[in-house]
Image (cartoon, rainbow, N blue to C red):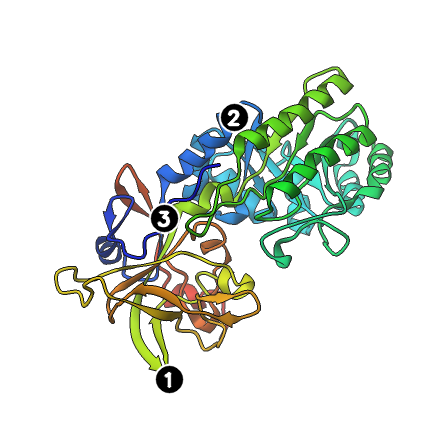
Amino acid sequence: MQQAPEFKTLRTEIAGVSVARLAREFGGTPLFVYDAESIERRVADLTSLGVFDVVRYAQKACSNIAILKTIRACGAAVDAVSANEIRRALAAGFAPKEIAYTADVFDADALELVVGDAFGCVVNCGSPDMIAQLGAALGERSQGFKLTIRVNPGFGHGHSAKTNTGGDLSKHGVWFEQIGECVAAAARFGMTINGLHLHIGSGSDFEHLAQVAGAAERFAAEIGDTVESVSCGGGLPIPYRSGEEYVDLNEYAALWAKTKAALQTKFGRKIELEIEPGRYLVAESGYLVAQIRAVKKQAENVFYLVDAGFTHLARPTLYGSYHPISVAFADAENALNDGAEEDAIVGGPLCESGDVFTQEEGGYVVKRRLPKAAVGDFLILEIAGAYGAAMSSNYNSKFLAPEVLIENGEPRLIRRKQTFEHLIANEIF
């Protein structure tokens, strides 16, 4: 398997563009920066395998419309988990038939959309109640309507207990013992279930991903010969540390090729196979650029305090997730650094003890060996393209960070810097 590159702790540029230039041209820091070539390369990884008929991007990882347009240009379809994600996909140019709406409940907006302006999108139901609600909303149009179901196979896995989406403690999907109930519920409205979707968690390992293939065969057989497509979900892990390995895509493809062939033999016709990556396509493309605003010594600990917090990148605080960290000197000629390093704790500006980027699951603060830096230097949180900007908030009345996409060596703004007027626009006083 391919190993991750060695993550350097000192850098000067991102995708060929100077870090200092990015901060200068786009309103300072914090700033999200994405490398379009990285996204295109990861989509190509999957399409080139020749096994998956559809690569469907799980946009919850990063839903900026410019990112969606980049992925659409690569020939991928898209997944949406809310009404506004459906609207984002439509705004990015996806046709309804290229959009799958996947959820465990219908809120009023989503139900109105899938039977209205987004009619023709794939409706992927994660609970029996959704099927009845969909049938009722469609009315006479329910006759012959095809839907898919997301099945909870009774097991799950992920990089954190909070990202595990299978098993009896997960709220996600139709419990596998209720498949027959769902088939009958659909039939009462004249609808059929023509697709099966399984997703067990974000950042799963290969052993658990492999279990999904066997489950798909069993569940497809239970649904019956109306099955036309199977989605193996996402969850493909990517390395966040030097020395970690990428998932063996050839082995993964071979596993699903076998499952696909078995289903096609069973049903006597073509079965379309989907894969639904989110993190895998965008994580490595993204960087959160911050600036060091204070260097503090607390007893024996050195703190680099930056102007980005968990309002911009929540994963370390939520899951204890590890992100590679690098430093870019603001003034390379006059930098303090001559190769010197020190152990530092990296924290943000928020009024929360948990606003620390160098922590492990459970909130245990740890040190990171970094170049010796000073106030004004830049600190970059890497592999931040997935669940970075998408999970941002205005906690502490902090602004959302602007976003920049680098295409062919040229950066362009894809989200403006938020202003105070934006921040209070919906408040009434």
Q: Quadrant of residue 417?
A: bottom left
Q: Earlier in the sequence, mark 3 or mark 1?
A: 3
In the rendered structure, which amino acid carries the disc numbered 1?
Ala
In the current view of this chain or complex, which residue is farthest to the left? Answer: 333
Which residue has dot 2 on it? 49
Q: Quadrant of residue 232?
A: top right
In the current view of this chain or complex, which residue is farthest to the bottom? Answer: 299
Left or right placement of residue 201 versus residue 377 in this view: right
In the rendered structure, which amino acid carries the disc numbered 3?
Glu
Which residue has dot 3 on it? 6
Q: Residue at x 58, y 29 (%)?
A: 253
Label 2 to label 3, Cα distance in Å?
A: 26 Å
Label 1 to label 2, Cα distance in Å?
A: 54 Å
Q: Which dot, 1 or 2, sits closer to the camera?
A: 1
Q: Nearer the viewer, residue 420 or 82?
A: 82
Q: Residue 221, percent across and down?
A: 80, 28
